[in-house]
Image: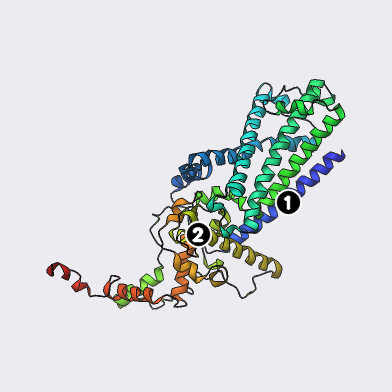
Amino acid sequence: MIPQILFIIISAAAIWFFSKKIMTIRRNILLGKEADYSDRTGERWRNVLLLAFGQKKMFRNPLVAVMHFFVYAGFIIINIEVLEILIDGVFGTHRIFSGFGGVVYPYLINAFEFLAITVLLGCVIFLLRRNIVKVKRLASPDLNGWPRSDANYILITEIVLMTLFLTMNSADTLLQQRGYGHYGEHVTGNFAFSSMLHPLLGGLSDNALVGVERTCWWLHILGIFAFLNYLPYSKHLHIMLAFPNAYYTRLQPMGKMSNMPAIQNEVLYAMQPELAPTDATTPDKFGAKDVPDLSWRNILDAYSCTECGRCSAACPATITGKKLSPRKIMMATRDRAEDIGKNIDQNGEFKEDGKTLLHDYISVEELRACTTCNSCVQECPVSISPLEIILELRRSLIMEESNAPQEWNAMFSNVENNFAPWKFSPDDRDKWVSEM
């Protein structure tokens, strides 16, 4: 009973800590302003299927996409076996599903082992790409420190978990062949890939094999619990958030910018004062200066960011050496949301800390470098929009701080007075024709 009690305690603790952190992240996301994304549900579910699960955008590079799909889908599907491990751990049974699965059970485990091999090989290749080949977008300075280490830790963890899974199966099937104890009561036959390890383990005694099998079993499930609780602190949180992020993605054309109705009404009332209501009020804020000024969807974007760098690799500002990196915009937004959350946890409510997302986390130079071309939005595999955050911060910068280059101010003035960026009257716009 002691192993079962210990297993139950560890499982309950792991699930409790994970749930607590997830609720904290949910709270942080809802710091943002309300926004309605309940329309066009059919398109939204299609995005979940194609973008989140099918990883449609990844297949612009088919080789990398196939490896990523096997690593992602393989790891998720293999963990179906966790259900059997949980039941065995709680009730003290061994391979409980083998008694119900009949001839299907070995085929299922063989399929899991095939996926385990693909996950293992994929993770090795991704480690090499990051640390030996040094793919440019994965070696960018904005990944220095924790973000780069985080990716390596996850890849190494997945390699270890898959190795433990295969070794556990290998020791188990050897003990079945020897008819040792309860192992002989659940004869599944050899499995395709773990049986290749038999020559390495075949010389061990029965007790040693039991030790190997039990050690791998415990380390495998403990590793999964550790991975579960590490996930909310890692960029790999996108494994979970990619699905809601794809569902709540913007369905408007990428080039369409959101206007402020209050500003549009001011223009309307200036032209037609008789329409102006007596109780008209101006907005409290223009654009966004800090995370709570963004929509909850913007913050969900930040937490869903995979830090893959495809946005920055396609950004003309980044390519030409400007300070702007769309990936860094998302990382900075997430960091600020986390810092605000910690502030609330410490004080019971948010206490001013003298910092804002604009200036302290994201600089004016970064915002001005954006060309609003939507390349980052187009390239993101999970439909994140760094551009929307940039536009909201830039709106605050210009409309609240009057902080814009002289060239921009001249353009704004021309658009307002001449209905075009150029400094000449609309009446003279076709003058060039008569001068030909």
Q: Residues within 10 Å of mark 2 (few under 14, many from 20)?
A: many
The vertical placement of 385 against 425, above or below, is: above
Mark 1 element type: helix
- Mark 2 sits on what residue? 326
Which disc number belongs to residue 217?
A: none
The vertical placement of 342 against 414, above or below, is: above
Give 162 or 319, whichever is nearer the viewer: 319
The vertical placement of 394 against 19, above or below, is: below
Q: Residues within 10 Å of mark 1 (few under 14, many from 20)?
A: few
Q: Quadrant of the C terminus?
A: bottom left
Tell me if 257 is positioned left or right of 130 in this view: left
Residue 239 in view: no
Tell me if 175 is positioned left or right of 59 in this view: right
Q: Quadrant of residue 334?
A: bottom right
Q: Quadrant of the N terminus?
A: top right
Residue 170 in view: yes
Q: Quadrant of residue 340?
A: bottom right
- Mark 1 sits on what residue? 16
Q: Position of residue 265 (x, y in %)?
A: 36, 71
Q: Position of residue 108 (x, y in %)?
A: 65, 28
Tell me if 389 is positioned left or right of 6 in this view: left
Q: Position of residue 9 (x, y in %)?
A: 80, 46
